[in-house]
Image: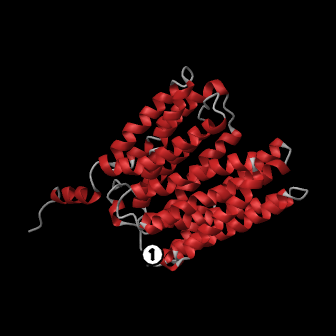
Amino acid sequence: MKKLFALTLAHLTVDFACFTALFGSVSPAVEDKTALAALFLTYNLIAFGLQCPLGAFLDAKKLPRVGFAALGAGVTALGLAVSYLGAVSAGALLPVLGMVAAALGNAAFHVGAGSFVLTACGGKMAPSGLFNSAGALGVSLGTVLGTGRPALAFPLALAAALLALAALLAPSIRGGVDKPCCRELSALVRPLPLERAAAILCLAVAFHAFASAVAPEVPGLTGVLALACPVMIFLGKLSGGAIADRIGAKPALLLSLPLSAALFALCGVWPALSLPAVLLMNVSVPIVQCVLAGALPESPGFAFGLSKLALVTGTAFAYFVPVSAPMRPYHAAALTALSLLAAAAVSAKPANLQKEENNHDQPIAP
């Protein structure tokens, strides 16, 4: 539990540092909107796209996961410091270099910390929900403070990142032996061929990410109220794992995602419905992550990174497929409904029970 909370707080600070660099340094230094959009896309591709190969490397070399997360946090802090130097000098070179370093650190931290949570979850999905939820708070904090008060954001984010690094390096936190992903998570997965299960889950994540990118905004949310959407994301991820532990992964998906899609469809009439729709959509995040890890029980780093690769693929569509404001509710509704594909990869019964039942169907040997 101590490690889980340390990793969760570190998750918040790493995302806080990255988005402080993006909005407090890179955004003011790059005036061209097209170039700025390309840089933000580059950040996503590095921070999320690299997690899959890094996770595979982590699994193959059997490296300590918390130690790898600490390395990522340290690189993120370095990137933030370089970005801060760029914020107080002329030109965009240092801000961009700092952003790239922060993105690399972000990728290493996430795959190390996220896959450790999957290996130490005890078969439960609530730990994954807690870990994932912290990112939304870090992103919103970095965005708001980086945009409005960068002089406060930079030293605060740097201090927080260094404290997170110190916590992750503490012997009481980084101690322990890594192990393969919890066998209990494998009971969540239908006995499909591995490639098919992984493809279904990755498609579901990509549809979810695209839906998140085109989700309609609620007008009139300024000041503190502008944090309403990140808070909904936080609450959705936080509650998702706990709900699934209580009622099951498939029922949680079948309850939350159709209701989310219906609320999105009504946002054209009542825009405020976007907030509960976002909350319900994010209930699926820790569930799908745990189910994918269950499909790849010996490769938690690769499984965690694969979900992030699917995430950045879906998000990237928003950069190249423009969606007009009036059509956003319907696009988000349709994409959220498509993300129900995840339920197809979840078993109604534990896999071991299915195997036992299948064995009973076999002829009895003499």
Position of 144 with respect to 277 (left or right) is right
Amino acid type for the residue under numbered disc 1: Asp
Position of 334 with respect to 81 (left or right) is left
Asked if one can make out residue 346 in the rendered structure from this viewpoint, the answer is no
Quadrant position of the C terminus in the picture: bottom left
Q: Position of residue 248 (x, y in %)?
A: 32, 48
Q: Position of residue 283 (x, y in %)?
A: 45, 44
Q: Which residue ends up furthest to the top in the rendered image?
A: 269
Q: Which residue ends up furthest to the left in the rendered image?
A: 366
| Residue 272 position (above or below residue 305) | above
Q: Residues within 10 Å of mark 1 (few under 14, many from 20)?
A: some
Instruction: Tell me what residue is drawn at x 76 percent, y 45 percent.
Output: 37
Pick the front one: 116 or 352: 116
Label 1: which secondary element: loop
Q: Quadrant of residue 207?
A: top right
Pick the front one: 123 or 183: 123
Query: In the rendered image, which residue does mark 1 sit on?
Result: 178
Asked if one can make out residue 61 in the rendered structure from this viewpoint, the answer is yes
Q: Position of residue 27 (x, y in %)?
A: 79, 48
Position of 247 with respect to 154 (left or right) is left
| Residue 190 position (above or below residue 79) | above
